[in-house]
Amino acid sequence: MKILQSFLLSIVTFFSPVQGILIAVGVTIMADTITGVYRCKKLKQPIVSKRLRQVANKMAVYEAAVILFWLMDHYLLSEFFKIWFSVDYFFTKIVALVLIFTEMVSIKENIEEAHSFSIAGMIRTLLKSGKEIKNDVNQII
């Protein structure tokens, strides 16, 4: 039992530099899942166990991808990227950003479908009204 604990502790310690990235990717996957379930509840669609199983698969694939890219970054690419960028694990962070961006787009789509509105449209409307307020203030002054 002690050997197993030592082995697991060694693995956790080895991957500690990428721990924050793994947590960030995992949190966005869970947020996407929560908004997906919310969308299904709001639209009265059935929540199927097959779709929830895909969450586990997605989590495993995304986390494995981050770990594999971190290994490549750590052992192969870190010196190459440090010539141009002063960022540790640059390639791993780019991959994580792409994965997180993908999940954020999915979260946005879930929210828009659940409430039947466009977030981009709301932002455009808000900016237009801000410009109108600015013009009104400039006319008063």
Image (cartoon, rainbow, N blue to C red):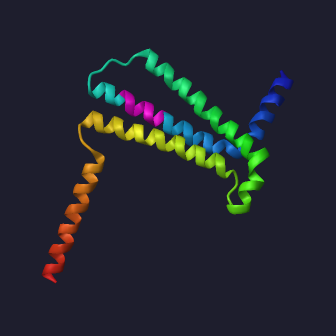
Q: Residue at x 33, y 17 (%)?
A: 46
Q: Tell me if 57 is positioned left or right of 134 in this view.
A: right
The location of residue 126, given as percent across then percent down, is 24, 58
In the image, the segment drawn in magenta is 30-37
Give the main secondary structure, helix, strand or loop, of the magenta stretch. helix
Q: How many marks?
A: 0
The image quadrant where one finds the C terminus is: bottom left
The location of residue 137, given as percent across then percent down, is 17, 76
Residue 35, magenta (yes or no)? yes
Q: Is residue 78 above or below residue 24?
A: below
Q: Tell me if 107 is positioned left or right of 55 in this view.
A: left
Q: Is residue 63 above or below residue 122?
A: above
Quarter of the view holding residue 127: bottom left
Residue reaching furthest top? Answer: 49
Q: Tell me if 118 is positioned left or right of 11 in this view.
A: left
Q: Residue at x 65, y 32 (%)?
A: 64
